[in-house]
Image (cartoon, grey):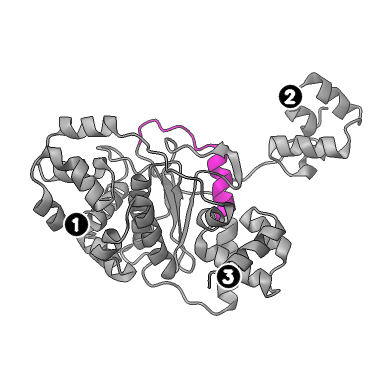
Amino acid sequence: MHSFAESIAKREKDRERIAEGRLTVPQAEKLAKKARIPFGYLFLAEPPQVTRPGIPDLRQIQDAEPLSDGFYETLEDVLAKQQWLIEYLTEAGARELPFVGRFATDTHRNADEIAADMRRELDITDDDRRKSPDAASYFSALSAKAEAKGVLVFKTSYVKANTHRPLSEKEFRGFAIAHKLVPLVFVNGRDAEVAAVFTLMHELAHVWLGVSGVSDVTPSRFGNPEEHLCNRIASNLLVPMDAFLERWVSPQDVDKLAKYFRVSKLVIARRALDNKLVDQAFYDEVAANTQRIKSSGKPTALVTIPIRNSKKFTRTIVASAMSGQTLLRDAASLLNVKPDTVVALAKGRAENG
């Protein structure tokens, strides 16, 4: 009988060495790492049953591809962070957050009403947009308000710390876990900055509805009614109807209004379509011409680590590690960094006040 290790070895030479017991420990570790499985699995006679975390698939693209290993590894990584914080806050006597699932049982859910409630709870004002020079700054301002209320916000473009394993924006744009104590939203950083702003508000709408799931946030005439509702809520938050109609003159204003509201041209076109200011053909043309715009510049690792791990989570676990409550290696493992990087994060925070 072939062992599990033999079944995953790609080369005949490797299978022979495994069968004869000639694989060294470093070689076995390399094989396990390449197969992305625990080292101990190599010694099993049969492949184990792998249970993946469950999350509702709310994507609206017809015939969407199955969620990839990269997605599930990302989800597992984020859930591990969430579980740590749940235990940490439970020990501290923290209470459930009142806005999580606030509209879950509302039979007449109104996008305007939910958007207004989110705007009040998160204290979102026009100044947040005006003071943000670009969409990236606007995202940072909005995510900071969400985290101040207790929502973890993750944003990254690759699996854990592996820059060679990019996440696909065509597969999913984001996901939300509407936990009462530690809700979280994840935004796929592969997307354009203006699209990330919309995804953030879409996923936060999921938290208010108490609906966990993975989204593609693609405006569609098909799909889940709750996804349509979350899209409308996000549009109302980012592009209030009164302000939009006040500035709209003609279809030539799409680009100007997109820059003003710090959103994509597609969001503006959708607002115009909903108000019968443009036809479906115009909207479809904008959608077809929408391309991802890469962000410029390469921020340092100490800047990106808290963004991809949630600034709130990073701040909490680094403080816990520095106080001795959490082992340094455990904190490093959850942040997908080396222990000395945890110390550097603590030092950087202390220097910046």
Identify the image quadrant of residue 273.
top left
Identify the image quadrant of residue 239.
bottom left
Q: Is residue 64 magenta?
A: yes
Label 2 vs 3, first from the N-terminus: 2
Please identify the quadrant where the N terminus is shown: top right
Q: Which mark is residue 10?
A: 2
Instruction: Work out how far the residue at label 2 is from the one at label 3, CA to CA, in angstroms.
Output: 50 Å
The magenta segment is 61-78
For residue 13, side relative to residue 115 (left or right): right
Which of 254 and 299 lies nearest the eye of the viewer?
299
Residue 55 image offset from top left, x and y in percent: 48, 49
Residue in the picture at 60% in, 57% down: 80
Q: Residue furthest bottom?
A: 93
Residue in the picture at 67% in, 75% down: 323
For residue 243, side relative to residue 26 (left or right): left
User: For the residue marked with disc 2, what is the amino acid?
Assistant: Lys
User: For the residue marked with disc 3, what is the amino acid?
Assistant: Glu
Instruction: Work out how far the residue at label 1 is from the one at label 3, CA to CA, in angstroms.
Output: 40 Å
Residue 87 seen in the current view: no
Label 1 vs 3, first from the N-terminus: 1
Q: Is residue 155 magenta?
A: no
Q: Which residue is mark 1?
A: 240
Relative to 242, say whether 190 is above or below: above
